[in-house]
């Protein structure tokens, strides 16, 4: 039995109602191991860090992610409440960032994988594509006092399968703007009474998205909150928005 530090125990106990007693014990150890593990944070790597790789019940930790019944949706809401309590207590205006990230994964059981543009390696003159899972991340933009800057703290991720994945299963494909609309409306229900601002790049510059979230959240381009953004970038963005209107 692992004894948690008092600071960690106070935070992790907020998630206890979403798990059974046994599953929560294993889930808490996995979270603690993720904090302590260097390199890839796989279940096996976490167990090695905790010194439990040779234990007979090692498979129980894998089942936390594969078989145990718990709601990531509810855990995301609790995590958001903890972040607000820690970094933005008493604030009425909350700013969030919305962006996608690619997880490079291969394997016969990974069905939602697609081929997407690699934003890091690509440029205006050179296009690089990569295969993997596309996740949409919602992040709380909060000032961190000891870092003297604003950090993007993710608390909700949504898998956005490829168009081919939906076509093979006879389902209607949901575009990134469709996922963004659902996330924005979900966030407005979670934070009633707050002024919510969501910041994103030009991927979300869509009239349908703005119309669907009007009155719920305020959407801004990423450069609107970046003091280092040049005037040329701002003028270019204004011209593109004028063309859409």
Image: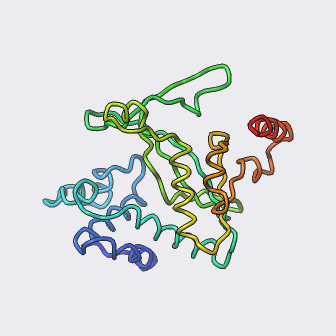
User: What is the quadrant of residue 55 in the picture?
Assistant: bottom left
Residue 34 versus residue 79: which sits nearer the camera? Answer: 79
**In this figure, which colouring scheme has been used for the structure?**
rainbow
Residue at the extreme left of the image, as rendered = 56
Q: Residue 182 in the image: x percent, y percent?
A: 51, 54
Relative image position of residue 45 (x, y in whole percent) = 32, 51
Q: Quadrant of the N terminus?
A: bottom left
Identify the residue at image location x=71%, y=52%: 220
Percent coordinates x, y for residue 34 in the rendering: 39, 58
Residue located at (58% from left, 46% from top): 99
Residue appearing at x 32%, y 55% in the figure: 46
Q: Which quarter of the rendered picture does the C terminus lie within?
A: top right
Residue 57 sits above or below residue 17 on the image: above
Q: Residue furthest top?
A: 125
Residue 64 image point, x, y percent = 26, 60
Q: Is residue 51 above or below residue 158?
A: below
Residue at (53%, 57%) from the top-left corner? 154
Query: In the rendered view, would you say 142 is above or below 116?
Result: below
Identify the image quadrant of residue 27. Answer: bottom left
User: In screen coordinates, is 180 left or right of 115?
Assistant: right
How many numbered tags mark residues here? 0
Q: Nearer the viewer, residue 169 or 201?
A: 169
For residue 159, side relative to residue 121 (left or right): left
**Position above or below: 24 against 211:** below
């Amino acid at each position: 039995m692992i004894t948690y530090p008092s600071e960690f125990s106070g935070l992790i106990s907020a998630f206890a109602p979403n798990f059974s007693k046994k599953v929560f014990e294993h889930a808490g150890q996995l979270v603690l191991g993720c904090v302590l593990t260097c390199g890839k944070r796989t279940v096996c790597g976490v167990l090695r860090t905790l010194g439990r790789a040779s234990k007979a019940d090692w498979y129980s930790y894998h089942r936390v992610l594969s078989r145990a019944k718990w709601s990531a949706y509810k855990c995301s809401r609790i995590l958001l409440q903890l972040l607000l309590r820690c970094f933005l207590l008493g604030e009425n205006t909350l700013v969030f960032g919305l962006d996608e990230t690619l997880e490079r994964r291969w394997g016969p059981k990974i069905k939602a994988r697609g081929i997407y543009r690699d934003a890091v390696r690509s440029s205006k003159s050179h296009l690089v594509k990569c295969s993997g899972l596309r996740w949409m991340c919602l992040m709380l933009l909060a000032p961190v006092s000891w870092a003297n800057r604003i950090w993007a703290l993710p608390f909700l991720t949504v898998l956005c399968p490829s168009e081919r994945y939906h076509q093979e299963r006879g389902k209607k494909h949901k575009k990134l703007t469709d996922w963004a609309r659902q996330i924005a409306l979900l966030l407005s229900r979670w934070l009633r009474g707050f002024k919510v601002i969501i910041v994103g790049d030009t991927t979300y510059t869509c009239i349908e998205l703005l119309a669907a979230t009007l009155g719920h959240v305020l959407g801004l381009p990423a450069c609107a909150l970046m003091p280092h953004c040049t005037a040329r970038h701002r003028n270019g963005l204004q011209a593109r928005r004028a063309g859409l209107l």
